[in-house]
């Protein structure tokens, strides 16, 4: 995607010249309010009649287009979008409404949208306006994203227009809204980078490709960069990452990016992302049906890179280290086998019961390597378990951790960004499931509570550092796109990461 224009203007809504004027409406308002009331007067009472007839009520995800006659307004089209009930409002409602508006604009052939922000003054007072500006900008940039790198022919079902601009209309707080909208745009661009990377197939988004992208970020933003190849991993003793990589001809990479936006006087925040660029399952091979989806198995790594770009572009006053273990999980005469016992970077030995439980192996070495930065907290994201999809489906990230305060921070960041998490217990009661007869620990705990036993496996490698783990297997890519997503990669949890780091800078 090219650049997306975002502008904030101070104008009467009816005077805004735009292909599509978007009016947000709360479900419990029986009459048009604010900007909508001004438009209604210009449109001869049409919006009021629509509301009274019940053709549009303002429910969540509802949208209805109306067409002014010449002279009635400067907008070519007006789109009513629903925010649901006013007392249930959260920024996520607005993101969804803006996402729906972008989809309508594509169908109607409108390249730009304008959105009056006055509705936000009725939910959060004056503070509500910049928050809404940020959410609207985020959603527009996210909704406009599309992965077309490998499309060479024009499809018949292609949208009539690609939306490339958003104008926010306000009569107060324009400066604050402008910087909030710019922030939203930067954060969404980071998430769109994650979506691009996750969408690229395994033959393109290889471990070296991820390292190249990290290199470009390092170059652009002046980040510290360390990239380990197979030999360097051997010298480091990363036996678990190397074991997974042993079945593949593709070079593995261990990537470390460091952003120093502040001297905080405490250890950095560490973000860790699973970077399996294709997961066949290895010798414990997966069924063929749906195996192509396993190109998304580096979504955690993609989100870490997307977040690092946004954090650096926003110049957040934070110190953040990103760690990405990256490899394919394939089969060959040299591949890791069930029953093999390997020595991890930490020194703990692992009995590999199932080569398809590879994510936790490569993360184990990354979590242990992270100790040399003495991080004040570690958060990892991984498409780790099919069991998480069964437990929580596609609407919640599985959240686990060793530190209740950190887990609360992550949950709050998830609520704020709409990348919601739900906690699962890391009780010691589950721990015997990963006891091994022959080694210190084994890499699977059987079918019961598969997400939790994967979390407990990771916990063995974090030591005393406060740590949280996000299982994004159900949320990193989806078939049923939400309004500001498309089918495929969601970019989750890029925005959650950025929000968590931002909130930390305010402590
Ligand atoms: N990458 C998969 C997990 C996954 C499954 C992500 C479905 C997204 C959708 C992971 O490496 C894996 O294969 N996990 C196994 C673990 C099992 C062997 C203990 C699983 O969940 O089946
Ligand atoms: Mn696997
Ligand atoms: Zn995997």
Image (cartoon, grey):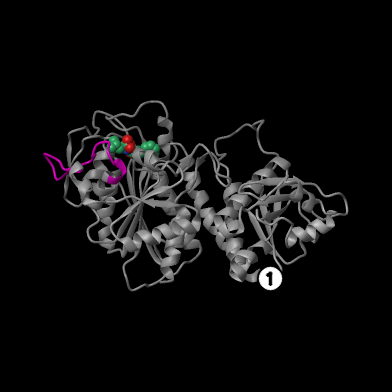
Residue for point 26% across, 55% down: 369
Residue 293 in the image: x percent, y percent? 43, 34
496 falls in the magenta region: no
Q: Is residue 129 left or right of residue 187?
A: right
Q: Which residues are magenta?
A: 434-452
Could you tell me what secondary structure mostly forms the magenta stretch?
loop
The answer, for residue 185, to whether it is visible in the render is no
Q: Residue furthest left?
A: 438
Residue 338 in the image: x percent, y percent? 21, 32
The answer, for residue 186, to whether it is visible in the render is yes
Residue for point 34% across, 39% down: 387
Instruction: Residue 463: name its quadrant.
Output: bottom left
Q: Residues within 10 Å of mark 1 (few under 14, many from 20)?
A: some
Q: Secondary structure at mark 1?
A: loop
Residue 97 in the image: x percent, y percent? 62, 51
Mark 1, residue position: 172
Q: Quadrant of the C terminus?
A: bottom left
Residue 428 in the image: x percent, y percent? 21, 51
Q: Residue furthest right?
A: 71
Is residue 202 or residue 232 the one in the foreground? Answer: 202
Instruction: Residue 41: name its quadrant.
Output: bottom right
Vertical order, 233 against 257 (above or below)? above
Q: Is residue 330 left or right of residue 463?
A: right
Is residue 250 or residue 4 the one in the foreground? Answer: 4
């Amino acid at each position: 995607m090219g650049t997306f224009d975002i502008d904030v203007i101070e104008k009467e809504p009816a005077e805004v010249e735009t292909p599509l004027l978007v009016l947000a409406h709360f479900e419990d308002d029986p009459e048009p309010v604010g900007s909508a009331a001004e438009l209604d007067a210009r449109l001869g009472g049409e919006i009021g009649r629509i509301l009274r007839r019940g053709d549009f009520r303002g429910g969540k995800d509802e949208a209805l287009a109306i067409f002014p006659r010449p002279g009635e307004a400067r907008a070519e089209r007006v789109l009513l979008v629903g925010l649901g009930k006013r007392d249930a409002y959260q920024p996520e409602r607005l993101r969804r409404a803006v996402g729906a508006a972008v989809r309508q604009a594509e169908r109607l052939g409108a390249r730009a949208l304008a959105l009056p922000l006055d509705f936000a003054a009725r939910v959060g007072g004056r503070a509500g306006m910049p928050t809404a500006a940020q959410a609207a900008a985020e959603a527009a940039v996210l909704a406009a994203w599309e992965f077309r790198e490998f499309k060479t022919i024009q499809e018949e079902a292609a949208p009539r227009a690609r939306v490339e601009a958003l104008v926010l209309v306000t009569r107060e707080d324009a400066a604050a809204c402008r910087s909030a909208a710019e922030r939203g745009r930067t954060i969404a661009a980071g998430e769109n980078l994650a979506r691009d990377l996750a969408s690229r197939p395994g033959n393109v988004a290889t471990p070296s490709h991820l390292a190249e992208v990290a290199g470009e970020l390092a170059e652009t933003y002046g980040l510290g960069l360390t990239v380990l190849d197979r030999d360097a991993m051997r010298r480091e003793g990363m036996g678990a990452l190397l074991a997974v990589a042993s079945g593949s001809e593709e070079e593995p990479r261990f990537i470390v990016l460091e952003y120093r936006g502040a001297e905080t006087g405490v250890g950095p925040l560490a973000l860790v992302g699973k970077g399996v660029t294709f997961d066949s399952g290895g010798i414990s091979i997966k069924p063929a049906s749906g195996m192509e989806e396993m190109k998304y198995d580096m979504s955690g790594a993609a989100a870490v890179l997307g977040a690092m770009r946004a954090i650096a572009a926003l110049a957040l006053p934070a110190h953040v280290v990103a760690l990405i273990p990256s490899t394919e999980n394939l089969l060959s005469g040299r591949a890791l086998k069930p029953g093999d016992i390997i020595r991890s970077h930490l020194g703990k030995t692992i009995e590999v019961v199932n080569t398809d439980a590879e994510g936790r192996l490569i993360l184990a070495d990354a979590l242990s390597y992270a100790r040399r930065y003495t991080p004040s907290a570690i958060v990892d994201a991984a498409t780790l378990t099919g069991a998480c999809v069964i437990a929580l489906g596609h609407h919640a990230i599985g959240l686990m951790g060793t530190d209740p305060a950190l887990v609360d921070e992550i949950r709050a960041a998830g609520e704020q960004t709409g990348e919601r998490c739900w906690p699962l217990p890391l009780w010691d009661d589950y721990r015997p499931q990963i006891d091994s007869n022959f080694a210190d620990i084994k890499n699977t705990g059987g079918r019961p509570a598969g997400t939790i036993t994967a979390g407990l496996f990771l916990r063995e490698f974090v030591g005393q550092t406060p740590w949280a783990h996000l299982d994004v297997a159900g949320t990193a890519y989806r078939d049923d796109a939400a309004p500001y997503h498309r089918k495929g990669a969601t970019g989750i949890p890029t925005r959650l990461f950025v929000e968590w780091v931002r909130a930390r800078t305010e402590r």
